[in-house]
Amino acid sequence: MSKTNYKFCFGPWNLSEGQDPYGPPTRKAQTFDWKLEQLKKHGFDAMMFHDDDAVPDIDHKSAAQIRDEAKALRRRLDDLGIAAEIVAPRLWFSPMTIDGAYTSNDPKCRQYAIERSKRCIDVARYLGTDLIVLWLAREGSYLREAKNARKCVDYLVEAIDAQLQYDKKIRIAIEPKPNEPMDLAYIPTIGHALALAQLTCDPKRVGCLIETAHAILAGLDPADEIDFAMSFGKLWSIHLNDQNGLKFDQDKPFGSANLRVAFNQVRALERNGYGRRGEYVAFDVHPFRTTKEEHWMAHLLNSRATFLRLVEKARTFDEKTAQKLIANRDYQALDQMVLEHLMGR
Ligand code: GLO
Ligand code: MG
């Protein structure tokens, strides 16, 4: 099998300013143009977008304004040779999504979320991508009794069906996350996402996006999630990052908390041929709050460097010896062999 040449991307939100729930930004906000320039200068291939990264203030713009702005952005991307990987509706900011978007108890709010998603699909079409990402940020509950989880599954299916019917060409990748901002999310894992896909009117156009940190927050191994999704041919994008155990979503540089878990994700991507159908490797990472402005790109460059080093590690792993150890059930030696390989011997 020939080797995959990976293509990389990130989103404008990955050059963030350092604010957290306890303190203000620590870096001055940069313009979108500056972020795009950095992406190009550092040799990334594509950008990920929220609908309002592409068309700011999208809720207050007409269909014609949305078209003109998105097309103008497309021309700039084309000139730079940068693709738009995905577009995701930002369904967690508006006053209409306080109690959830597709699963709000208020029918007017649910309608808003569907209409907003259709505008997002328009933007994707103008930017030249068929891939819509649904991070279902507020689809869950703070307390069990506040919502009917059975009904919420129907609402999710209705909302996805409305999008699949609105545009017969788009594909939807569900990005599950078990918590944050919700206490408990309705679609916490890849198993849930792919099961939900089966209930929609066109299951083959509904797949998933795995984020390392989200899988870890669900108590799962991201590499197993990758193998599972790819057994269904449904891993259409990936957000590599890292997460130090069960706490707030950390979005650390890839491999930063657990190099071995990162190595196993790369092995899983390699053995399944991720990237051969045009999929991108995206880093959904944030700079540490302490990061100075002059080091603003470091978390992204480091994530890519670590990823590429781990690709080499995956390709030079001594599979023959590993297979012998497995056949002999000598997992003790296999364990050490992995550690020695990662440490450079
Ligand atoms: C947050 C998510 C978020 C999404 C992005 C794309 O936890 O990972 O960054 O990936 O909004 O929809
Ligand atoms: Mg993500």
Image (cartoon, grey):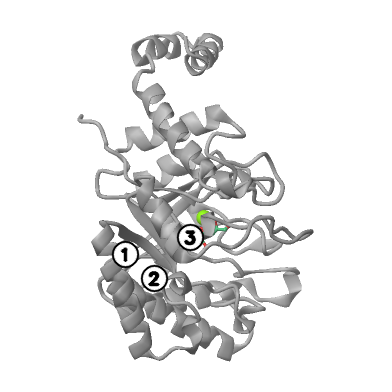
Pick out the residue farthest to the left. Answer: 2
Q: Where residue 343 sits in the image (x, y, percent)?
A: 52, 15
State the image quarter where residue 68 is shown. Answer: bottom left
CA distance separating discs 2 and 3: 31 Å
Q: Where residue 47 sits in the image (x, y, percent)?
A: 38, 58
Residue type at mark 2?
A: Thr
Task: Tell me the element at label 3.
Answer: helix
Q: Residues within 10 Å of mark 3 (few under 14, many from 20)?
A: many
Question: Residue at 37% of width from left, 37% of height from top?
Answer: 269
Q: Which residue is mark 2?
A: 200
State the image quarter where residue 105 is shown. Answer: bottom right
* Residue 241: image tag: none
Question: Residue at 64% of width from left, 48% of height from top?
Answer: 250
Reading the chain from its start, which is encountered first: label 2 or label 3? 3
Q: Residues within 10 Å of mark 2 (few under 14, many from 20)?
A: many
Residue 223 visible at all: no
Q: Are marks 2 and 3 in contact (CB under 8 Å)?
A: no
Whether the residue under disc 2 has CB within 8 Å of ligand 1: no
> Image quadrant for the N terminus?
top left
Q: Is residue 115 above or below residue 154?
A: below
Q: Which residue is mark 3?
A: 12
Q: Are marks 2 and 1 in contact (CB under 8 Å)?
A: yes
Residue 141 visible at all: yes
Q: Where residue 31 sits in the image (x, y, percent)?
A: 50, 65
Q: Which residue is mark 1?
A: 205
Task: Tell me the element at label 1.
Answer: helix
Query: Which is more toward the observer, 279 or 227?
Result: 279
Q: Is residue 18 above or below residue 145?
A: above
Task: Tell me the element at label 2.
Answer: loop
